[in-house]
Amino acid sequence: MSINWRNILLFVFVGFLIIVTGSTQSWNTALIILNMGLISAIMSLGVNLQWGFAGLFNIGVMGFVALGGLATVLVSMPPTTEAVEAGGLGILIALSMGAATIIATILMRGKMAAGRTRNIATLVLLIGGFFIYRALLDPAVAAVEKVNPAGTGYLGGLDLPVMIAWPIGGLLAAGAAWIIGKTALGLRSDYLAIATLGIAEIIIAVMKNEDWLSRGVKNVVGIPRPGPVGYEINMQANAKFVETAASFGLDPVTASTYYVKLSYGVLFAVVLLILLILLQLSLNSPWGRMMRAIRDNEVAAEAMGKDVTARHLQIFVLGSAILGLAGAMMTTLDGQLISSSYQPLRYTFLIWVMVIVGGSGNNWGSVLGGFLIWFLWVQVEPMGKHLMDFVTYPLADDSGLKKHLLESVAHMRLLTMGLILLLVLRFSPKGLIPEK
């Protein structure tokens, strides 16, 4: 098998950019870019699995990433004992009532003949169940949110190791994707896109407003770190670590910061490598060839006996699970859940740019796009500042044009992302590493 030196050089170039950042700015910044690049690459793989393998246009990426972040809170944060005693049982009963209402409605509709009677019965069950659900939920929620609202005001989590939350985040996103897929995958691609976007916004709205679940916009801070990572203060108190840091010419504070970020990088790289191997194997398997056949011509694939809707649901769930996993990893890296930070521009549009620029349908291209676009997203603004300083240098300090250009630096990110996307679509429409 011949070596594709062009693709290797592209990855080397991205690595060179990160090294230059470390040399000219700070290694702390370079390591932050590296870690978020690894997580962005995983997100890109999830979208590429859905779009590149099956042609599913999911623009609700933000919602699945947010569910992964929520999983870290539900799994790894300690429970708020007083809040659980005040309203935990009531919330559990209310949620069980809501689930029972939905199940009863589904069973009823399955047993009754289609017609006006079934429609009326459906409305009676859903409306009646909703009012009972709210009557049980509202007082329990109020009791929970009254418990130290400035510090907690929510139920908390299960106090389990945070790395358990990573696969749980994937399962939570997969469950949501299954529910969405059962209702929306029969739609045309443009309708599917609208449905996924709307449901993602609903997920974010719930996280922002249900304080008992995720503290809403008050944020959850202090999410524990994975065991292998550790904490800087413990390292700085370790005489052996301090001695080792000194041998490299580093003070304990700087060394501990680098160590933590490198530890995260190793964990994320292992996850990325495992996913990449599995996806490459699946891409080249009979299953992968079948998915690409469905993507290219659904009618022909269905004529050959393939259940297109079932396969679409399968790959939609798998891709969403990867997005949920990446969301849990990102929240772990941040150490906090900020519900208001989930914006479509960052967690949907940017991920799609990564997939398109890297190469839709090619896993290696998605990884490359994840690193490259994230690097540019972080670095374009400071580079734009230097550019504008240079361009406006001859202008007087009180010049209106100079002031306007300098104030426009904050918009360089959006301008650059749009420009890159246009250039790639014009000169390399299949991406930097096209699908074979």
Image (spheres, grey):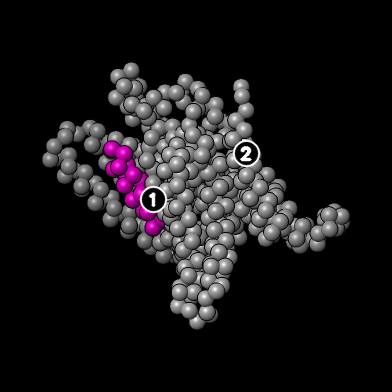
SS state under label 2: helix
Q: CA distance from mark 2 to mark 1?
A: 37 Å
Residue 197 counted in the magenta span: yes
Can residue 64 be spotted in the picture? Answer: no
Numbered label tally: 2
Q: Nearer the viewer, residue 428 or 21?
A: 428
Mark carried by residue 200: 1
180 relative to 48 in the view: left or right = left
Q: What amino acid does circle 1 point to?
A: Ala
Q: Is residue 371 magenta?
A: no
167 lies above or below 334: above
Residue 9 circle label: 2
* Secondary structure beneath label 1: helix
Nearer to us: label 2 or label 1: 2
Task: Name the dominant secondary structure of the magenta segment.
Answer: helix
Residue under the image location 25 percent in, 51 percent down: 128
Q: Residues within 10 Å of mark 2 (few under 14, many from 20)?
A: few
Pick out the residue farthest to the front.
Answer: 394
The percent position of residue 428, horizontal first and vertical second, equals: 46, 39
Q: Who comes first in sequence, dot 2 or dot 1?
A: 2
The location of residue 276, given as percent across then percent down, is 57, 34
Residue 394, image x, y percentages? 55, 74
- Residue 55 vs residue 377, the one in the foreground: 377
Q: Residue furthest top?
A: 304
x 71%, y 56%: residue: 23
Image quadrant assignment for residue 119 = top left
Magenta span of residues: 187-207
Q: Quadrant of the N terminus?
A: top right
**Amino acid at the residue labelled 2:** Leu
